[in-house]
């Protein structure tokens, strides 16, 4: 399949800088939601860019490094658990995506977002369901965001070792839920996601 279909069409319409934006971490019980916005050169394609969830850890890390080196511009943003609890995860994700796009050092001509969310940005945009699989630019953003967030959760695992963040990255596995029941919540847990287990 042609992962550059959207980008080529936009290029034909005169767009030079096409930004892909994606998030990771909407579902976990702990940690921030993280978004990456990337503008990739379309004349020097990196092989193997795909939905980050389909790639091995090693492959993702190698691709993320390559994407960051080759990108015209990259920006990563995060919204912390406290803010997620305050405004809800959907609004937090939109805010995170908006900040990622608006913080790019090169202003995009067009923005492609993963999913079905319209962002509050003053730029033309299109949202693509399964965009991390269908669009090269969004796929690149998904890899960068996933590698960044996984590293963050590995860091939290050292700080709060009883929860096993290094294994599940904050998602609601049985082991994670059991740890919450046994030890309570730590500062990086989302209170709005864990109310049923709060002591």
Image (cartoon, rainbow, N blue to C red):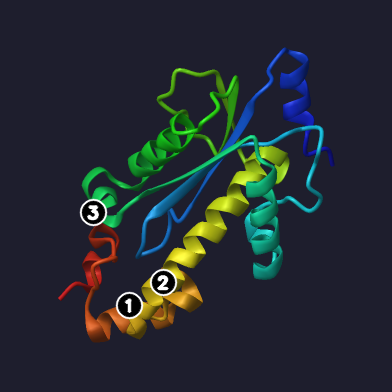
Which residue is at 25% across, 57% downward? 192
User: Which image quarter holds the C terminus?
Assistant: bottom left
Q: Comparing marks 3 and 1, which lies closer to the viewer?
A: 1
Question: Where residue 187 appears, x then y in whole percent?
Answer: 23, 67
Which residue is at 35% across, 65% downward? 30
Q: Residues within 10 Å of mark 2 (few under 14, many from 20)?
A: some
Q: Secondary structure at mark 1?
A: helix
Q: Residues within 10 Å of mark 1 (few under 14, many from 20)?
A: few
2 or 3: tag closer to the N-terminus: 3
Whether residue 59 sits left or right of residue 175 in the image: it is right
Question: Where residue 194 appears, x then y in whole percent?
Answer: 27, 66
The residue singled out by tag 3 in the image is 82
Residues tagged 3 and 1 counted as in contact (Cβ below 8 A): no
Q: Is residue 133 above or below residue 152?
A: above
Q: CA distance from mark 1 to mark 2?
A: 7 Å
Question: Where residue 48 appears, x then y in whole percent?
Answer: 78, 53
Give whichever of 17, 21 is nearer the camera.
Answer: 17
The residue singled out by tag 2 in the image is 155
Which residue is at 39% across, 77% downward? 157
Q: CA distance from mark 2 to mark 3?
A: 18 Å
Q: Comparing marks 2 and 3, which lies closer to the viewer?
A: 2
Residues tagged 1 and 2 counted as in contact (Cβ below 8 A): yes
The residue singled out by tag 1 in the image is 159
The circle drawn on residue 177 is none
Question: Where residue 31 appears, x then y in whole percent?
Answer: 36, 62
Quadrant for residue 193, please give it.
Answer: bottom left
């Amino acid at each position: 399949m042609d992962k550059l279909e959207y980008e080529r069409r936009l290029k034909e319409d005169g767009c030079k800088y096409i930004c892909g934006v994606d998030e990771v971490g909407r579902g976990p019980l702990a940690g921030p939601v993280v978004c990456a916005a990337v503008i990739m050169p379309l004349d020097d394609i990196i092989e193997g860019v795909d939905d980050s969830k389909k790639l091995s850890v090693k492959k993702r890390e190698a691709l993320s490094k390559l994407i960051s080196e080759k990108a015209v511009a990259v920006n990563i943003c995060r919204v912390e658990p406290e803010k997620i609890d305050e405004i809800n995860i959907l609004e937090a994700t939109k805010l995170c995506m908006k900040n990622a796009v608006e913080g790019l050092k090169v202003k995009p001509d067009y923005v492609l977002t993963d999913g079905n969310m319209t962002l509050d940005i003053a730029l033309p945009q299109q949202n693509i369901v399964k965009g991390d699989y269908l669009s090269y630019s969004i796929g690149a953003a998904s890899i960068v965001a996933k590698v960044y967030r996984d590293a963050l959760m590995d860091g939290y695992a050292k700080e709060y070792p009883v929860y096993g963040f290094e294994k599940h990255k904050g998602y609601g596995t049985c082991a994670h839920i059991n740890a919450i029941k046994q030890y309570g919540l730590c500062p990086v847990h989302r209170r709005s996601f864990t109310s049923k287990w709060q002591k």
